[in-house]
Each structure stands twice: as C-alpha cells, then as structure tokens.
Image: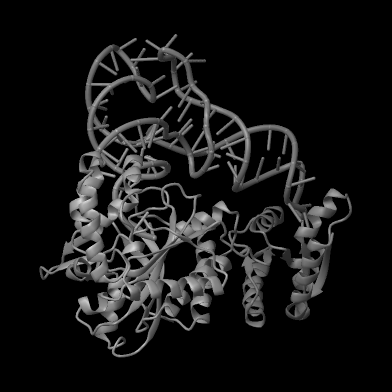
Amino acid sequence: MNKFQSVRGFNDVLPPDTALWQHLHAVAARTFASYGYGEIRLPLVEHTALFARSIGEVTDIVEKEMFTFKDREGDSLTLRPEGTAGTVRAGLEHGLLHNQQQRLWYAGPMFRHERPQAGRYRQFHQLGVEAFGMAGPDIDLEVIALSARLMRSLGIGGLTLELNSLGSAQTRTAYRAALVEFLERYESSLDADSRRRLRSNPLRVLDSKDPQTQEILREAPTLLDALDDASRAHFDGLRQGLEDLGIAYTINPRLVRGLDYYSRTVFEWTTDRLGAQATVCAGGRYDGLVEQLGGAPTPAVGWASGVERLILLMKAQGLTAPDPAPHVYLCALGEAAQRQAQRLAERLRDALPWLRLAVNAGGGKLAAQLKRADRSGAALALILGEAELAAASIQVKSLRAAHREARESTPEQQQAVPLAELPQRLSGLLEAEHLMRNHP
RNA sequence: GUGGACGUAGCUCAGUUGGUUAGAGUCCCAGAUUGUGAUUCUGGUUGUCGGGGGUUCGAGUCCCCUCGUCCACCCCA
C-alpha cells in the first residue's frame, strides 16, 4: 500500500470520469448563458464570520461541519461550505447589487466536515445560480425552469420537483411559535433528535424520518396554512408559472431548507436512486440575506446542485460523455520515420484543429503499435516506415472496419496515401470510416 | 459525531478447523508472425494479504488498536 493516501473525503477524479465532468460543465455553462447568467468566480476561503452570519449560528454546518483555521495573523478563516454567502459578499463588495438586477452563476468546490458516504464528500462540488433584485415569482420560476432545463439537457430523468413556501420572516416566526407550542404537547413521544431540534431549530422537526414523529406531525399546523396574503399570492404565482411551462411539481409542506436565510419559496429536485443522498439540486428565496450582510434590502433567489450526485445519477442512468478517443493513431517504424512522424503530427494538427491525433511513443514493433492503436479507440491507424518515407506516402489502415471484415474473413482495408494529400483527405477517410461503422 | 459491513496483484475476486514458497481471471510485456491490431497458443512481470501491535512452534486466517471504503443514522448538494 502506498505511503500517502488522499485525505479522507477528498477525492481524485480520473479519466474517464473527468470526461463526464467536462461534459456536465460544458452543458451547464451553455445553459446558464442561454438564460443570460454571468459567471462569478469566488475565493475558496472567506472570513469565518461571513458564514456564521449568513448560514445561521445554530445550523449543523456552522456548528460542526466547517473547515475553520487561523491564518498567520490570527484571523479566523473558513473553507467555504456553500456558495451563496460568498456571492452576496462579493456582490456587496463590488457594488453589483446596488439598486440593480443581477443574474449570476458559479461552479466549484465546497467543503464540509461530514462523515463521507456515496454522494457526500468533504470536498464536493456545486453548480449554482443566484438572481438578485427581483421580488416577484417570475424570477423564482426562471431559476427553477433553468434547473429543469439543465437536468433535461444532461439527460437526467426520474427526478421529482418538490415545492414549499416558508412565508415571510414574520409569518415564519409566528408559525415557529405555533409549531413549538403544538410539539411541546407531545414532547415525550418525539424521537431524541426532534426533541433536541425543538429548541434549536424547530422547523427541522418537520422533515424528521422517525415514523412516530411523522405520525404526530399529521395533526400539526402546516406552513402553508400559516402563510400571509402576500406570500400566498407569491406562491400561487409561482405555481401558475410552473403549470404554464409544463413543469411538474409536488407540494411538500414538510420541505424545510437547512440554512437559516431562506424565506418564501423553497424547492428541491430529488431522486430515489442515490440512497440517502436524495437531493441533487436545491434552493429557494432569501430576501433577507443581503440586508443581513450589510447591504440594502434586496430580494434574491437561487439554487445549488451537487456535481458528484449528478455524475452518480448520470452513470446510474447509463449516460456517457462524448467519446474522447483519438480519431487517428500514428505508428512510426525506425528512427527516421519517428522523427518525421512528429513533424507530420504537428502539421496535421495545424491543418485540422478538430483532429484528435495520438502519436505512438515508446517504440515497439508494428504489431505492438497497432495493438496500442486498437486499444486507443482510434478509427484509423497511420503507418509510417522506411518504405513509405521513400515513396513520400503513408499507409492508412481502417481499424474499426477491419474488425468486422476479419470476422467475415475478407482482407483488411488499407491504402497508401501520398503524404502531401493526407491533410485534405483525412476528414474524408474518417467520414467513410464513420459511415461504414454505422452502415455495415 | 453514532451504529454496522468490508479491506488479498493495476482491476474483479478465490484462499478449507491457523500449517511449506499466497492463487485465478483480466490487464501489461515478449514470442509464435525480421512491417500489420480481434481471436488462439507459449512464456514472463505484478503483492509489505490496508497499517501497527498481540496470541502461537507457525497468522491472509484468531484478538486489540488504527487508517480507508461502503451502508444506515445525523446533515445536506
């Protein structure tokens, strides 16, 4: 076993998985752009107080999951556990939120010191959007539609959109009091975690997994019944919009987001294929946060999605990235041919920027080189040897077609092409190869 | 943070009540084929049995500790 291992919960991403990651990020960047969102890049480290003030002092994230350390000046710094706080901080710091609308997206690693599990890691990655300065349900609808389109573009199916409203800060406070009053009557029957949360974060009792607690909650007052008129109108507007766009959803009156800053709309995309890590995308409205961090009152809404969970889901559903295999594998025999092969390869890359060309390295006889060519997944092998150099030509060998013909016991397909014509003819040769592949 | 299962070759795994020098498949390399990739055949490389300690004449196997992965809880993306 190796002397060094990666730190627990901090994972490497290797090929071919990296191809899926690249595909996911490319699709996401395209989708964000198609809604007019601009990318914001944020530091991984912020002052600890920023997260304590935004996420909430008594949340699990702040209480026990942050990677916090003192720097050399003695300042308390924290590896970001989520992206919204940093986005708001940057927006305020650079005047992005001053009396204007902003549509932003970000992507990158986040850090939480939790026990690792499939789909849950200490360094994990999120994609997220944040929209500032728009108070109506239309922007809630937009960010949800954006998330729906992203999932669709990635080919991810089988998701459920769960929706709820937490109401305004005032109704939430009033509801919390009513809920506590109700639950205290059954306190002795609640599970231990819920009894603890009854004092620290009573709304969290709503999504307890304990059956007996859920039984008690059937009679509890619900958030939706407690909504003030304005929040109800907002919620109804969003529901109408979702129906207009044909986006299916289910109302989940027990849906409570874990972070303190949410108000009114909250939502989650969930799956039943990831075990306990069911949430792949989640967000909501946080109208009070900007003011809480020292800015002017600014309505805001956003969501974040876990990249590892999306990747896991894509794999579970058999989705693959576009094939990254080289189109062409160049074999060279002998010292002179090897030198020429390097020059030829650079010339081909100059002439055909789209071409994926692998050049044999490490020598080997032709059989070994062709074996590598085959394993690389290339459609064509180019063979450059003494004879070809002398004739100023190159052998072009069809690797994929030959497999089929070999089975049919017919001769392999191979032809000599003058070196001078190779750049012009290569795309045609590849196309023929592709056609033969699809139409045997 | 709590509870449980599991760690043997790069990968997937076998390994009997504790008993010689730890195995298979795959992968990789070489040869059969002095310049032609599937398949086949022959040969070869690959391990501190996750790590440390203990019991024993003897530990991959039993015990303790530790690290890691996975599952559930908790939490969340």
Where on the picture, by quarter, is residue A308?
Answer: bottom left
Q: Which residue lies furthest to the left in this view?
A: A74
Where on the picture, by quarter, is residue A300?
Answer: bottom left
Q: Which residue lies furthest to the bottom in this view?
A: A99
Would residue A162 be found to the left or right of residue A4 on screen? right
Identify the residue at horizontal 67%, vertical 82% (top origin): A351
Task: Tell me residue A269's x, y (percent).
Answer: 46, 61
Q: Quadrant of the C terminus of chain A?
A: bottom right
Residue A163 visible? The answer is yes
Would residue A343 be found to the left or right of residue B15 on screen? right
A133 or B4: nearer the viewer: A133
Would residue B72 be found to the left or right of residue A418 on screen? left
Residue A64 visible? The answer is no
Identify the residue at horizontal 55%, vertical 74% (top origin): A244
A262 or B26: nearer the viewer: A262
Task: Answer above or below: position of A77 versus A275.
Answer: below
A20 or A347: nearer the viewer: A20
Q: Quadrant of the N terminus of chain A?
A: top left
Task: Answer above or below: position of A211 versus A261.
Answer: above
Task: Tell me residue A301's x, y (percent).
Answer: 37, 75
Task: Tell me residue A121's x, y (percent).
Answer: 36, 54
Would residue A322 be found to the left or right of residue B69 on screen? right
The mark tally for this picture is 0
Task: Answer above or below: position of A271 versus A173.
Answer: above
